[in-house]
Image: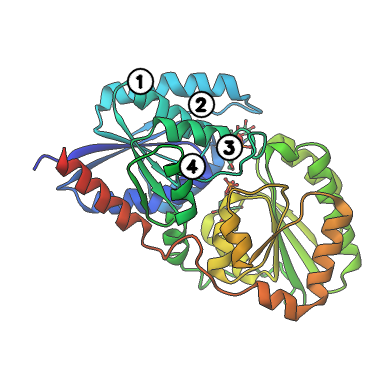
Amino acid sequence: MVPSTILFVFGTRPEAIKLAPVIEELRRDAESFTVRVCVTGQHREMLAQALDLFGIIRDADLGLMQPDQELTGFAAAALTGVGRVIAATAPRVVIVQGDTTSALAGALAAFYAGVDVAHVEAGLRSGDRSAPWPEEVNRRMISVLARYHFAPTEEARAHLLREGATDVVVTGNPVIDMLLSTRTEGVAFPELDPARRLLLVTGHRRESFGEGLESVCLALRDLAESVPDLEIVYPVHLNPHVQEPVRRILAGVEHVHVIDPVDYVTFVALMHRSTLILSDSGGVQEEAPALGKAVLLLRDTTERPEALRAGNVRMIGTQRERIVAEAGALLRDPARLAEMAQVRFPFGDGHAARRIAEVLRDRLRGQ
Ligand code: UD1
Ligand code: UDP
């Protein structure tokens, strides 16, 4: 059998983390697949941090990131660039993940070239076109373009079937594969005080820029000042709209560590070490239940209601007083926190990549 060329197209940190196990799985079967990787470079340092850690070789790197880039210019450049890579690579299938602009550009370029699109993490829906923005609409458009839909959960599958998709398989999310294969023994944090409980924070969503993010930072300052045994670590996303308010408001606040993004192994070790997580990240909502951690979600909508129902995640928005009240209450009530912070697997069992490879082998053989 002649191996089928599979082209992965992505551009950001979370896509690299989630696709790495799939890339590795397909690479292992060279009889079936010839794997090619095209990165748009939507992210630069944060993408390199992940790719270097996982040893992913880029066959094409469009290097498109601009400081403070806007959506239209980036999307147009990515569409053109990926279109050229598809023309040169002639893949049977293009694989994209999730809902970024890179994923949308990859799917659209493939569709225009007459190449089948496989979508990993398909079928998530917040039901609100304005949040997360622009991701909710990006992923809906990708669903229209895709032929193969790899849904992380039954609920995601149900969304897709309702919208008319036909080839939908529940695989779990490969982020759980990645998480469960990540070894953190030996990662130490000498700068953290062992007598203090760790509150780990991430936040970068576009709909929170401005007032929302400032309010989160003010809440963190209040918590650092009012909870006596607390220490806060915030690895700050490199987006200037995030860096500026976080560093301005939290500079010099005692027991708050504002740091640059850390590599995946270090971040997983920080999650392990944490007592509570505050985040608006998609990936963190998926990882925390599998680690037995509790998350207060700094958003007003979520496309991952499975995490809310599991009990690990509680959605609280970005308002300062509410964050202080909710985090304070949980930190004062270890029994309630322990009830939330149990190990659960709403997003898969760590074998998503294997299932995705099986489906692709089957479909390509059948053609
Ligand atoms: C993007 C995705 C979002 C995803 C997030 C993950 C879109 C529309 N948004 O948002 O869905 O959740 O990535 O982190 O696709 N920057 C750097 N270095 C980096 C990365 C970013 O300097 O390594 C700065 C640049 O100034 C860049 C800006 O951040 O212009 C914004 O990056 P962009 O990818 O457009 O948006 P994100 O907010 O990261
Ligand atoms: N993460 C990381 N280093 C950090 C912060 C987060 O490796 O400093 C990981 C995290 O474990 C998760 C992913 O990055 O897997 C989330 O990425 P991000 O928050 O950028 O995007 P989102 O998940 O919101 O799309």
Q: Where is residue 181 in the image (x, y as percent from the top left)?
A: 42, 65
Using the rendered image of the protein, determine whether residue 295 is visible from the camera's viewpoint: yes
Q: Is mark 2 on a helix, strand or loop?
A: loop
| 3D distance between C-alphas at marks 3 and 2 | 23 Å
Disc nearer the start of the sequence (1/4): 4
| 3D distance between C-alphas at marks 1 and 2 | 21 Å
* Residue denoted by label 4: 98
- The amino acid type found where label 2 is placed reads Leu
- Please tell me whether residue 189 is drawn above or below residue 142 in the rendered image: below
Disc nearer the start of the sequence (1/2): 2
| Residue contact at pointers 1 and 2, CB within 8 angstroms | no
| 3D distance between C-alphas at marks 1 and 3 | 22 Å
| 3D distance between C-alphas at marks 2 and 4 | 19 Å
Residue lying at 32% horizontally and 51% vertically, measured from the top left? 356
| Residue contact at pointers 2 and 4, CB within 8 angstroms | no
Residue lying at 45% horizontally and 44% vertically, measured from the top left? 122
Residue lying at 26% horizontally and 27% vertically, measured from the top left? 89
* Residue denoted by label 1: 112
| 3D distance between C-alphas at marks 1 and 4 | 19 Å
Q: Rate crowding at label 1 as few (under 14), some (14 to 19) or many (20 or more) other CA atoms within 10 Å.
A: few
Q: To which quarter of the image does residue 161 belong?
A: top left
